[in-house]
Image (cartoon, rainbow, N blue to C red):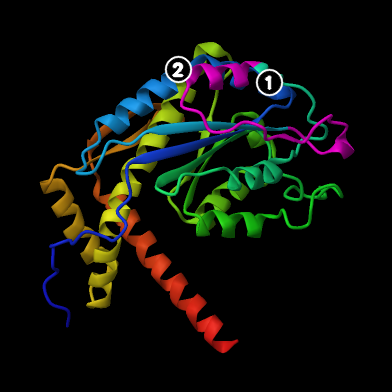
Amino acid sequence: MPGVINTTVGSRKGTKSRNLDVVFVHDSTGSQDPYLHSATQETRNYFKLISDGLKNAKHSGPKGTARFRLIAFRDHREQGDAWTIKDTHDFTSDPDVLEKQLKALRAEGGGDGPEAQLDALDAALRSAWRGDAQKVVFLITDSPPHGVEPGDRVPKSQPSSINTPRIVSDYRKNDIMLFVLGCVPEINTYKRAVHYYKQMVKDIGTGGAYVPMKVASTKDSARMRFLVVGSALNAYDVAHIEHEYHDWIIDQANSGHDAKEIAKSLHGKLKKEGHKCHEIDHDHSGHCSGYHHNVISHARVQDIVDRALDGKRTHKKTVRAKARL
């Protein structure tokens, strides 16, 4: 039988600084006008609130910085769009720059419903990420990519290398958190879109989420702010705890302790030390109504432990597979 859990945590090699890199992958087809306007209106709030969250984070290392990048997408040329993705902007820490980039986008085109989301997610992978930053991608859209809905085919102009399994694998390998902000009610008119995105985030397994978002006009822009800021700071908080305690979690599992035992012990330690985590608040209809910063919940710690142990199991399978080659 395993002994008592050792709650002494040594420092992990290569401790991360507290930086955050965020990429907005924004649908800019005809239905996206209120979302593009709201994103433009909220740009300065994104910078201020996320930067303040990084400065106030409880940790022993240096204070981190946030950078932002914008990628826009429409549909493929078969549907008559003049362009598929716009991937020309570098990361910036200047709100004026991001605001100008968003203002330049026009909600036009879109063809037949499904769009070029996978092309844009592939472009986000190739961003100039900082090696010491938590990587976060926000996909804002109201439709699925091609090939998801019954009867819809992948366009010939989409490279065969751009497909869901490869996107999932690369996001997982590169430890990128994907948050899909599904624009409602439009995205709910598709049979498979919501399930597809939820499964994609689950398969990536890095802690992102699918969240419905309703923005009918710029009067609703606060909902977008709550989701973006709350999710980005949640990713930031969780990444720090995961990095600091990952090796300890694996050590406890190797000593015979199960996931529930490990999570209980870790939650008690984090709670005692005053660790907090940002979380999204939801109203009765499931939409975001704000975010809060409070003592980390047991459910969040359990999620951190489960992902660490899932990564351990995946690593073992990969090693065994290579050994058989």
Instruction: Identify the element where label 1 is drawn.
Output: loop
In front: 281, or 117? 117
Describe residue 56's horizontal placement relative to residue 232 as left or right. Answer: left
Q: For marks 2 and 1, give the CA distance.
A: 17 Å
Q: Which residue is mark 2?
A: 44
Q: Residue at x 55, y 12 (%)?
A: 218
Q: Quadrant of the N terminus?
A: bottom left
Residue 285 seen in render = no
Describe residue 53's horizontal placement relative to residue 106 as left or right. Answer: left
Q: Residue at x 55, y 43 (%)?
A: 128
Could you say where residue 254 lies in the image, as x and y percent from the top left? 27, 76
Q: Which residue is mark 1?
A: 105
User: Mark 1 or mark 2, which is nearer the start of the sequence?
Assistant: 2
What range of the chain is rendered magenta? 74-103
Crowding at mark 2 (Cα within 10 Å: few <14, some 14-19, many 20+): some
Describe residue 267's horizontal placement relative to residue 305 as left or right. Answer: left
Q: How many marks?
A: 2
In front: 214, or 305? 305
Could you say where residue 40 lies in the image, as x and y percent from the top left? 55, 17
Amino acid, disc 1: Leu
